[in-house]
Image: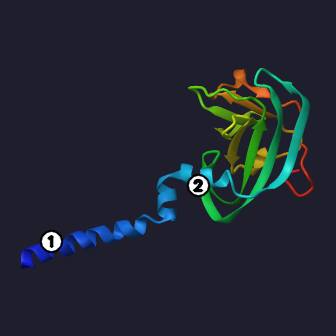
Amino acid sequence: MTRGLLSRHLAITFLAIPFLFLSGSDAFAQRNPEVRLRELMSVPGKVISEAKSARPTTELKLTGYRVEEIKLPRQLNVEVRGQQVAVDKAWRVTVQGGPFPVRAMPAMIWIDDEIAGRGIENETLSEITAITFDSSLIREGAVVSISYGEGKEGRMKASQRLRLTREGGNQ
């Protein structure tokens, strides 16, 4: 190899090495926070509140909800109510019913008057799930509802309020 070609080859190699290390899952997840949320959709959680309705309610045919507490494998820094906080738990809130329509506006899951998170539909459109890191939302008697878009006026409420198990939530 000529000296110029060797220098060029080494320069390209040294430029590429940092990108190889950055392609690990942590770096990828940091650049793509949606990846981390998608991972939290399938990890095992502990059910801390669940309700089922014998009769579907609202035009979305809501039949119930489930709230699961998820212990994170490590502490994360996330934004909650506009502030960076360290968390070691997340809550997966799932609304059941449908089949839910796929719309231009995203499904939003609410707890009382706060958005818990943007919903993700399952394959059969029978559940919409959101992840929240805000522990203050998970409390006895709170109301779970769903809307398309962030408007409060279009929300449809689950027929039963949150009833937490002894171990779960902020009682």
The numbered disc on residue 56 is none
Q: Nearer the viewer, residue 82 or 55?
A: 55
Secondary-structure class at tag 1: helix
Give the quadrant of the N terminus.
Answer: bottom left
Label 2 crowding class (10 Å Cα cut-off): few <14, some 14-19, many 20+?
some
Label 2 belongs to which residue?
A: 36
Total numbered labels placed on residues in the image: 2
Q: Nearer the viewer, residue 113 or 47?
A: 47
Q: Kindly identify the residue that appears in the image at 82 percent across and 39 percent down.
A: 65
Where's residue 157, x and y in %?
A: 80, 28
Q: Of marks 2 and 1, which one's residue comes earlier in the chain?
A: 1
Q: Nearer the viewer, residue 84 or 9?
A: 9
Q: Nearer the viewer, residue 169 or 72?
A: 72
Q: Is residue 51 visible?
A: yes
Circle 2/circle 1 CB separation < 8 Å:
no
| 124 lies above or below 132 | above
Amino acid type, residue under disc 1 in the picture: Arg
Amino acid type, residue under disc 2 in the picture: Arg
Label 1 belongs to which residue?
A: 8
Where's residue 2, x and y in %?
A: 6, 78
Give the quarter of the image for residue 113: top right
